Image: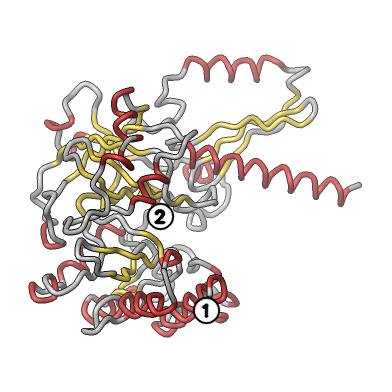
Amino acid sequence: MHANGARVTGLARRKMMHHGAEMFNHQHRTHVFVLHIVHDTTRIVYLDRAAAVCSRAFNYVKDPITLATFLYRFSKMSREDRRHDPTVSLALEGEEALFRGLPRTYPSTAAGLENPVPISMLEHAVTRGWPVYAMNIFAQWTDAKSTPKSLRDDLPFVSHRCLVARPAYMSGSLAGRGTRGFVTYDLTEKKVIYVKDSWRAVSENIHSEYDVYRRLYDKITPVVLHSTLLYLTVRSGGHVRVSSPKRNDAQVGPAEVRVQNTRTQDIFEEEGGPDTSIRPMRRHHRLVFKEVCTTLEDFSQARALVGLLHRAIIDTHRYGHAFAWLHAGILHRDVSAANILIYRNGCGTLYGILADWDLSQTEEQLSIRGATAQPHRGTWQFLSALRQCSPETPYRLSEDLGSFVHVLNWCVLKYL
């Protein structure tokens, strides 16, 4: 009975985590409340991207006041107090019609376009059953025809209203980065862009992906910039900023907004729970990219697969992964099939681009043991055997190169 009870409890816990992840993926939330009911007892559970905390179990039949009080107070909460993301709301009727019509009306793959968009990505974004949301991104934006060198600290903070629906990519895990990627229509500029939404761990020793791209861009010379596409072009990004509802977004400064953090780590600290270094605070983070890409698994033939991987690793002139390590001193540390993208420009040229630099570290960080708060966690299918057996050992360049081999083997065995 004890063994069966443990299995049932474990299954219930996994189902609750799964349903929590689904709520985060299908809605725009900063946290979720869940009632976990077993027979005549229940727990109130609080979930965010850092961890989960729950109340003590109580008998809601003998003590209905506790549950009734919670439900009453929850019903009186505002949408933001229920932890819906205040920067996202349901799109207006006209906006929804515009977004759902993009696969027919947007010049997605016409020859000669500066930034063509794959029609399949637009069709996936408007899948029936997924509501259309308006996302207000208040940040420093570069010009629509920007290059990687256009990112500057003196750019003004402005708000762009962007439409999103079904994610092009979403994480299946509740706790962690919770990455989602959206093919997005920017109503401000009337252009399709790509938005990456995630929750990054906050630590002095962990750089944000936005900062990593800035460091990569600083090393790109004008000659390199005009000869090839090394990395995705960041139009905007940083921590999600929520401005005061009583003021115009276009008139507030960066000091007059607040950011979105997880809270479970504070509860653990107050209650003397698990070490918060194991589950550090996470902060809501977004990146806006100029290019809309497909994944490596959308390659057309074996020759194209090898060529795309070659471009992502070194290219003809030691670009890609090699450029990041040799010139910027940055190691990716999460090479996977999902993190290598295919971009087709207006002339039909294919580029293999290494993206998702969330887990990257600088050469200085790699030389310091324990530079991050957590053991390295990449995509397990593409990690080295050493990394899977000893995740706390110092990370090396050879492991990234080995991951490229695993990616090639994965795609060959799965598709060829």
Rendered residue at 11%/49% (across/down): 143
Which residue is denoted by mark 2 in the rendering? 201
Q: Is residue 201 left or right of residue 251?
A: right
Please provide percent x and percent y for residue 311: 30, 77
Calculate the distance from the C-alpha at mark 2 to the C-alpha at mark 1: 31 Å
Label 2 secondary element: strand
Q: Amino acid at mark 1?
A: Asn
Rendered residue at 56%/46% (across/down): 272
> Which is more toward the observer, 204 or 18?
18
Label placed on residue 409: 1
Q: Which callout, 2 or 1, points at the residue further toward the start of the chain?
A: 2
Rendered residue at 19%/39% (across/down): 190
Is 349 placed above or below 38 here?
Answer: below
Q: Is residue 82 left or right of residue 254?
A: right
Mark 1 surroundings: few (<14), some (14-19) or many (≥20) residues within 10 A: few
Please provide percent x and percent y for residue 2: 88, 48
Mark 2 surroundings: few (<14), some (14-19) or many (≥20) residues within 10 A: many
Q: Amino acid at mark 2?
A: Ala
> Which is more toward the observer, 392 or 359?
359
Is 396 placed above or below 347 here?
Answer: below
